[in-house]
Image (cartoon, rainbow, N blue to C red):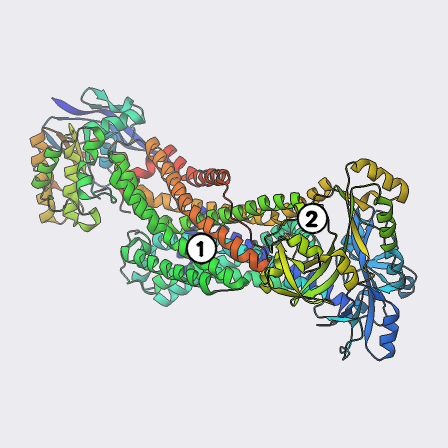
Amino acid sequence: MTLLALEDIRKSFASAEGAVPVLQGVSLGVAAGQVVALTGESGSGKSTLLHIAAGLEAPDSGRVLIGAQDMAALPDAGRAKLRRGTVGLVFQQFNLVPSLTVGANLAFQARLAGVHDPEFCAALAVRLGLSDLLARYPEQLSGGQQQRVAIGRALAAKPKVLLADEPTGNLDEATGDAVFALMLELARAQGAALLLVTHSARLAGQCDRNLHLRAGRLA
Amino acid sequence: MTLTALLSHWLRNKVQLAMLLAGLTLATALWSGVQALNAQARGAYATAAALVSEDGASRLVAPSGQMDQARFAELRAQGVLVSPVVEGRLAVAETRVTLLGIEPLTAPQGTAAALADGDLQAFFAGAGFAHPETLAEFSAPPMPLSPSNAVPVGTLLVDIGTAQRFLGMEGQISHLLLTGPAPDPLPDGLQLAQASEGAELEGLTDSFHLNLTAFGALAFAVGLFIVHSAVGLAFEQRRGLFRTLRSLGVPLRSLTLALAFELVLMAFVAGLAGLALGYVLAAALLPDVAATLRGLYGAPVPGSLQFSPVWALAGLAMAFAGAVLAGGQALWRLWHMPVLAPAQPRAWAMATGRAMRWQVAGALALGGVAVALAWFGSGLFAGFALLAAALLSAALLTPPVLALGLRGAARLAQAPVAQWFWADSRQNLPRLSLALMALMLALAANIGVGTMVASFRATFIGWLDQRLVAEFTITPRDAAQAVALEAFLAPRVNAVLPLRRVDATLAGFPGAVFAMRDHATFRDNWPLIADVPDVWDRLAAEDGALINEQLARRANLWPGDSVLLPGAGSVPVLGVYPDYGNPLTQAIVTEGWFDRLYPGTPTRQLAIRTDDPSATRAALLDEFGLSAQAITDQAQAKAISMAIFERTFLITGALNVLTLSVAALALFATLVTLSGLRLVQLAPLWAMGLTLRQLAGLELARALVLAGLTMVLALPVGLMLAQVLLAVINVQAFGWRLPLQVFPADWAQLALWAGLAMIAAAAWPAWRLWRGGGGPLLRVFAYER
């Protein structure tokens, strides 16, 4: 069953020279439990596509289907609600909430969506190796630990769709591999559709499918 | 190149630049504006002093307030260098002025200067001189008048003969100015009065000017908070640039010098703008200040401002000093920054618990100083030092106390957004702390000064009702008319209560002794703070005197003590009465005793008790042809007193509003500057499903909550300020102590203003967040920040 479907997505940005097309009719689908890697050169539109999939950015045209709902057709409040309950996001910069403890960060989105399961969250913390760090603040953690918190936060709400933008880009290779393996394992275990943006062909090779974006089109 | 790179930051952050310049401009403007007011007033006192005395000259006075002109000739013949002066109040239509009669040939140099450009022949023939502002008040001057800036405002300078004619003092003079050494022994029946009028004014108005200076300093400090905040945040934002420049080989010394030059440049621009604004501000406020000084102290201050280069240079120096004070920390931090310091923006140094602990320690130390000053200090400066220490201590304690409150709220919060709201507010507190400290100071100053003024107003109104019980008062033209009026009125009204006074030095302070007729009007109404049993009977029996609160507090004389009255020796103090609005000391003895002590003292006013004021008034107008100005009814007197009261605090109110505005600007500057740094903290919440509208609403709510909490903290600080103003500063400055009264409705109004100021400050960043469509937040995910 396809949980995330992008249909003929087009997006351009205004510049001094006029509109610069970034995405020119991109269509893709990610099924439940499937992991799809999206690779491409810098500026090829990978992150923009991911932001559109998350409802953080609106496409100029095209549809973004999360399950049966068209994210692109919803107003800001509707997109936020869908994101809250259905989409998990993992960023290269971790983007944790600096004022909350690790424990509060882990549970935040799940509580926001009203689906917080303390036992599941505790088990997730154990699985991510964070159970001893729950009282700490993000700034007191290493990069690898912070990214594990970000993954845990995204998964704690049991999202249908997981979107990850260069999740290991800020980590060394060994730590990155470990974090990536953990994310794959947990996402598959939850049956989430995972769309992963990465520069790394090695990581992309571990995914179920590999899509390459070039000049705004899937190659 | 280095400087260009540094300055490019401001081109990209124009609002931040505008805030920095606005902060320094406002700080300079408020400070230099207040200094301009003070300088103008002090210049006027010096003019007044120069007109009637040599430097430090004394005068010879008679206890009755007048002496025969023959005393002048007699003393000159004995070789005593004296010059006669006739002084009195003259009413011309609606205008009341001081008529100062001098004898030009023997007058002091200051007087000669006033006459230097005039026509002496015309002067002897009855013409006079007046300040251009005084001249403008007359539609029909009482005599030919020429303009002179050497004559104080509200004074007409005429020949002694002219003054005697207008004041009905033929053959009499008010006092003799000593233009040489004082004779030893003093001539019979004459006393030496030390201070000249100008010097007295200087002393009397010191507290008023100190008050203004304190407000100016407070506003300057609040303005510097803005500058410090803007410079500090710009430093944080440019850490990456500093690192890059250092990595490219720019020496630390060059970088620091470039940053210092940038600061000096801004100080110069803002200093000039501040001076211009300060001048405009002072010119706008001067008429009120002048009216206050005239009403409260009788000080002749002109209502138009004169430019002084010294004032301008001092203002510019303050702008530089302020810039160095506010930006010094940034220079220090740059000097000590490692070449590869992390480029990530980080919170202010105060964010660390260690810095907070130092802050608390500093606050406690200052609190200790304040307590010590309250316990052991005395005098006006000790009072202001106490205020400064207490306010600074409270300001330093504001962020830690707010942090405690926010931590408590976070613990109580259940919902995830609420938990984040409180935790995030606490985390951002260090960045907002300077602006919140400025807001706390401004609010506390508003509450404190507002409470003091309102307490004073309430007490003053009650006191006026007690003191102004006579249906009306008459100001006779001269002593003969006073006698005739009393004789005419005595059978027609319930009571005629004459007012007679002589100037006197009481316990070393300038003042006057008054006569009081034994009458139920006084027995039933005259308010007393402290008294002996049967005070009125004992006063009538000439057992002693009443003294005013000013004399009681300055000389520490209370019922049971004795006061030295000229001509009477040491007499018991029977009671102490409040005497608001009067800067001088007073003593009251019963009428008969007064007339024996100071024979020949003319009656200056007559208070009339009557059941039919309008008929009495009409009879007076028919019989004596009195002008309407000569009769003041009770309502008029109250209105005049209240007008003087309100005008006195007009300047305080204006400065209050300005200080609060500066604090609001500080908040706006900080919130606008912070809005860029806030994106990193808000972006994850947006990604997790909060809408832009919710985030903008939460930002506004945070501003309101912080304003509310700051207001709660400012309340006890403001009340403490009011108590110090009422119990220490007022007592030292004016000589009276008032009970503290609280006015919660005023606080609610102020809280509303604070909330509105905070919403105004937070609205623009919140609006940009909401209407920005998420673009700025997206950049958080896209690029390294």
In terms of secondary structure, where does tag 1 sit? helix
Residue B426 is at least partly visible in this image = yes
| Quadrant location, the C terminus of chain A | top left
Q: How many labels does the image show?
A: 2
In terms of secondary structure, where does tag 2 sit? helix
Towards the viewer: B435 or B251:
B435
The chain under label 2 reads: B
Towards the viewer: B715 or A52:
B715
The chain under label 1 reads: B
Q: What residue type is labelled 1?
A: Leu
Residue matched to label 1: B391
Marks 2 and 1 belong to one chain? yes
Mark 1 nearby-residue class (10 Å; few <14, some 14–19, many ≥20): many
Residue B38 is at least partly visible in this image = no
From the image, state whether disc 2 or disc 1 is nearer to you.
2
In-image side of B455 versus A175 (left or right): right
Mark 2 nearby-residue class (10 Å; few <14, some 14–19, many ≥20): some
Q: Which amino acid does label 2 sit on?
A: Phe
Q: Residue B728 carries which label?
A: none
Q: Residue A59, percent across and down?
A: 29, 28
Residue at 75% in and 71% down: B191
Residue matched to label 2: B522
Q: Is residue A208 above or below residue B481?
A: above
Residue at 26% in and 60% down: B340
**Residue at mark 2 to residue at mark 1: CA–CA distance:** 43 Å
Q: Is residue A109 above or below residue B214?
A: above
Q: Residue B319, percent across and down?
A: 52, 59
Residue at 31% in and 51% down: B347
